Image (tube, grey):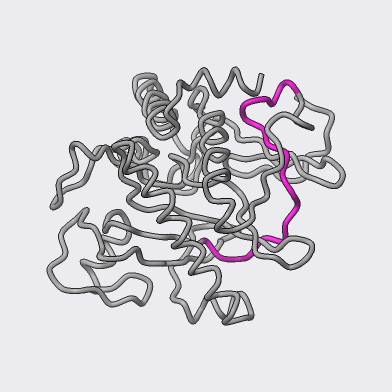
């Protein structure tokens, strides 16, 4: 769709060379269990981009981020799903913050009583809120699945205890800011994943996407109840379908049925509208 040099194509995002900066484009591709399904989710990439812009603005006083513009330098064909961003030296750690016990964290807790080396009290129930958010990092696997690691292992990966501690503190601070904003709008941010890099001056900088339905679990607060799984405005809906579809979770991923596609799009758009306080169309109009 563009003559710009393609630098990298990931499961969801494509990165293009803009000279001094990068063009980050969020596609409508969706993956589960590290495999991309052949069926896109219409407008998904635009939801991810619009929400990331919202959170970049909300958290810019906590930590610098790579966002430069959603229009300046963004070709017309990528408006709404493309961002001009600064080039960073990305850190080799997935920075996961959990405010509630669910997903893989719940499985690990049931098996070991701990998550990423953090011992937790006995008797926690599924979807229960932690007294304070916990930081449970993982590796960034080039192939296969990311692996949960403890804080000491992040120090080894980053080569600096000071940097590892800064990443942990900033991750929790950004989570808290977004979670507070979301809760005021009737949405619970159960957990999320951040990625950080260093800018040209070595300053820790928030990159990639931020608190989107791809990288987070969003629950409606009005139906929240501990002791069970929660309905959600995120990729968990597709993940649940994939889990129960009979697929063995090895590539290639199967086609997604049309009704699941439509319901997934509805959940993503609902997440944008509830969290931003505006219509999804307003985001598209602003960047068109």
Compared to 172, does 286 lie above or below?
above
Instruction: Tell me the residue at 36%/66% (across/down).
Output: 134
On the image, the x and y values in percent for residue 25 come to 66, 35
On the image, the x and y values in percent for residue 104 come to 32, 58
Instruction: Tell me the residue at 21%/66% (across/down).
Output: 110
Q: Residue furthest toward the right?
A: 19
Quarter holding residue 136: bottom left
On the image, the x and y values in percent for residue 76 come to 74, 21
Tell me: 98 left or right of 212: left
Compared to 258, does 11 lie above or below?
below
- Is 90 contained in the magenta span? yes
Quarter holding residue 196: bottom right
Q: How many labels does the image show?
A: 0
Tell me: 128 left or right of 247: left
Tell me which segment is drawn in magenta: 76-94
Q: Which of the image's four quarters has the C terminus?
A: top right
Instruction: Tell me the residue at 55%/24% (across/down).
Output: 283
- Is 6 contained in the magenta span? no
Q: Which of the image's four quarters has the N terminus?
A: top right
On the image, the x and y values in percent for residue 207 come to 62, 52
Quarter holding residue 219: top left
Tell me: 24 left or right of 284: right
In depth, the one of 214 and 65 nearer the eye is 65
Instruction: Tell me the residue at 79%/62% (across/down).
Output: 200
In depth, the one of 73 and 30 nearer the eye is 73
């Amino acid at each position: 769709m563009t003559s710009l040099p393609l630098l990298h194509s990931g499961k969801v995002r494509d990165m293009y060379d803009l000279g001094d900066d990068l063009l980050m484009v969020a596609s409508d591709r969706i993956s589960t269990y590290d495999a991309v399904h052949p069926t896109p989710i219409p407008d998904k990439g635009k939801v991810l981009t619009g929400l990331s812009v919202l959170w970049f603005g909300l958290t810019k006083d906590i930590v610098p981020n790579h966002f430069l513009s959603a229009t300046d330098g963004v070709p017309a064909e990528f408006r709404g799903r493309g961002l001009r961003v600064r080039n960073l030296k990305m850190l080799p750690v997935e920075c996961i913050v959990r405010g509630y016990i669910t997903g893989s964290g719940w499985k690990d807790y049931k098996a070991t009583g701990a998550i990423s080396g953090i011992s937790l009290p006995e008797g926690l129930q599924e979807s229960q809120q932690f007294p304070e958010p916990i930081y449970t990092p993982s590796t960034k696997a080039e192939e296969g699945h990311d692996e949960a690691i403890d804080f000491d292992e992040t120090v080894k990966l980053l080569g600096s205890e000071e940097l590892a501690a800064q990443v942990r503190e900033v991750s929790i601070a950004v989570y808290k800011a977004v979670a507070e904003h979301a809760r005021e709008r009737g949405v619970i941010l159960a957990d999320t994943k951040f990625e950080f890099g260093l800018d040209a001056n070595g300053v820790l900088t928030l990159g990639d996407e931020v608190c989107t339905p791809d990288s987070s679990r969003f629950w409606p607060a009005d139906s929240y109840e501990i002791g069970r799984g929660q309905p959600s405005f995120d990729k968990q809906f597709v993940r649940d379908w994939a889990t129960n579809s009979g697929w063995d979770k090895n590539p290639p991923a199967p086609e997604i049925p049309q009704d699941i596609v439509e319901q997934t799009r509805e959940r993503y758009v609902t997440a944008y509208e509830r969290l931003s306080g505006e219509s999804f169309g307003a985001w598209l109009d602003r960047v068109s």
